[in-house]
């Protein structure tokens, strides 16, 4: 079964990327970079 969509119908199709997804990706990157900077500035050895 094939479905053909015209240009107007293609623009009405919504994808899965949302503002919440973008905000979560940005916040994860900020947290990761903050961890890298903290580890570089204040390195601690593991307790073995």
Image (spheres, rainbow, N blue to C red):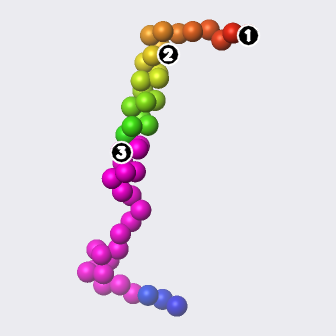
> Circle 2 is placed at which residue position?
39
- Earlier in the chain: of badge 1 and badge 3, it is 3
> CA gap, disc 1 to disc 3?
38 Å
The part of the chain drawn in magenta is 4-25
Q: Are marks 2 and 3 in contact (CB under 8 Å)?
A: no
Horizontal arrangement in the rendering, residue 14 relative to residue 48 (left or right): left
- Earlier in the chain: of badge 2 and badge 3, it is 3
**Residue 24 falls in which quadrant of the image?**
top left
- Earlier in the chain: of badge 1 and badge 2, it is 2
For label 3, the SS is helix
State whether residue 20 is above or below residue 15: above
For label 1, the SS is loop
Q: Are marks 1 and 3 in contact (CB under 8 Å)?
A: no
> Circle 1 is placed at which residue position?
48
Q: Residue at x 42, y 27 (%)?
A: 33
Residue 14: say if magenta.
Answer: yes
Percent across and percent down for residue 43 are 53, 10
Residue extending furthest front? 20
Q: Residue at x 57, y 9 (%)?
A: 44
State whether residue 15 is above or below residue 48: below
> Circle 3 is placed at which residue position?
23
> CA gap, disc 1 to disc 2?
18 Å
Horizontal arrangement in the rendering, residue 9 relative to residue 15 (left or right): left
Q: Nearer the viewer, mark 2 or mark 3?
A: 3
């Amino acid at each position: 079964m094939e479905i053909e969509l015209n240009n107007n119908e293609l623009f009405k199709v919504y994808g899965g990327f949302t503002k919440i997804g973008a905000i979560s990706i940005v916040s994860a990157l900020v947290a990761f970079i903050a961890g890298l900077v903290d580890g570089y500035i204040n390195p601690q050895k593991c307790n073995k």
